[in-house]
Amino acid sequence: MPLVTFTSDFGTSDHYVASVKATLLSTDPGLQIIDVSHDIEPFNIAHMAYVVRSVYQQFPQGTIHLIGANGNNPNLDTILLSEINGHFFVAPDNGIISLISEQNRPVVFAISSEKITNFNTLGAAKIACFLAKGDKPEDLGTHTERYVQLMLRQVKATRKEIAGHIIRVDHYGNLITNIKKLDFDILSKNRRYSLIFGRESVSRIHQSMTDVEPGEAFFVFNEEDLLIIGINQGHASQLLGLNFDSPVNIQFED
């Protein structure tokens, strides 16, 4: 039986997460449910997409990823079911599917009212149960290309510059950018460069945050090969005055 992961902005101080799990387990007591996070910032689709996109492929293919979002769904009468890279996603029609799939055009099904009566996370949980029991997506909904689609900020890379943005401020205050290691490695080969953020400019990328002393800034590529700006044992966002969508550039010298 496939795993079911659950990600939401419901928090843990109320009963909302437990209610969804009760629906899942009441339908199938044998389900194995993995919590990804329920501390997604309320109504922050970019945060939710970043968290899910960062981890879903670490689960076995065939895993069902249930996504719950409170109040940020413009199409309240629509639940989407999609397959992305061998994984299934059950989510509201709020743009989250397009942000998770990034460059890949996912196959998307709109759930039929014949299968569920409640177009909310509890209804979506029942769809996840149908999938876990072996139902096919085409049996649960109708193929559609009409769903909310959003686009992430794109990196602009030229021989002279990589122009990126901060896409997430994590729990520690680290600034995660959309600048990829592959682009940097290609453009920086045998060339000097300057990493520019806010009013600061540096000319070194570290191998690890431990390369610097506590209180000093570090610049590393994470396990997703995305550039991070942080402060060892400090909160980079607060200390550097940078937040989501702040520009980060790398300029190269000939």
Image (cartoon, rainbow, N blue to C red):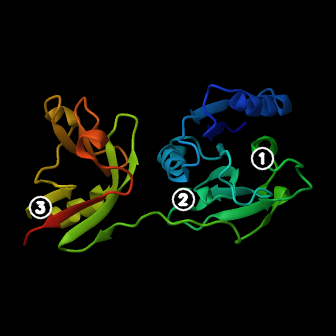
Mark 1–mark 2 Cα distance, whole angstroms, equals 20 Å
- Above or below, 17 relative to 134: above
The disc labelled 3 sits on which kind of residue?
A: Tyr
Mark 3–mark 2 Cα distance, whole angstroms, equals 31 Å
The disc labelled 2 sits on which kind of residue?
A: Leu
The quadrant in which the C terminus is found is bottom left
- Above or below, 147 relative to 135: below
Residue 121 visible in the shown view: yes
Numbered tag placed on residue 120 in the rendering: 1
Question: Mark 3 falls on what kind of element?
Answer: strand
Q: Which residue is mark 3?
A: 193
Which residue is at a point 63% across and 38% down the rendered structure image?
A: 5
Q: Position of residue 51 (x, y in %)?
A: 50, 44
Give the image quarter of residue 65.
top right
Q: Which residue is mark 2?
A: 99
* Callout 1 touching callout 3 (CB < 8 Å): no
Question: Mark 2 falls on what kind of element?
Answer: helix
- Above or below, 72 relative to 103: above
Residue 48 relative to residue 109: left or right: left
Residue 218 relative to residue 169: left or right: left
Count neighbours of disc 3 (C-alpha within 10 A) and say few if under 14, some if 14 to 19, many if 20 or more. Answer: many
Count neighbours of disc 2 (C-alpha within 10 A) and say few if under 14, some if 14 to 19, many if 20 or more. Answer: many
Q: Position of residue 156 (x, y in %)?
A: 31, 71
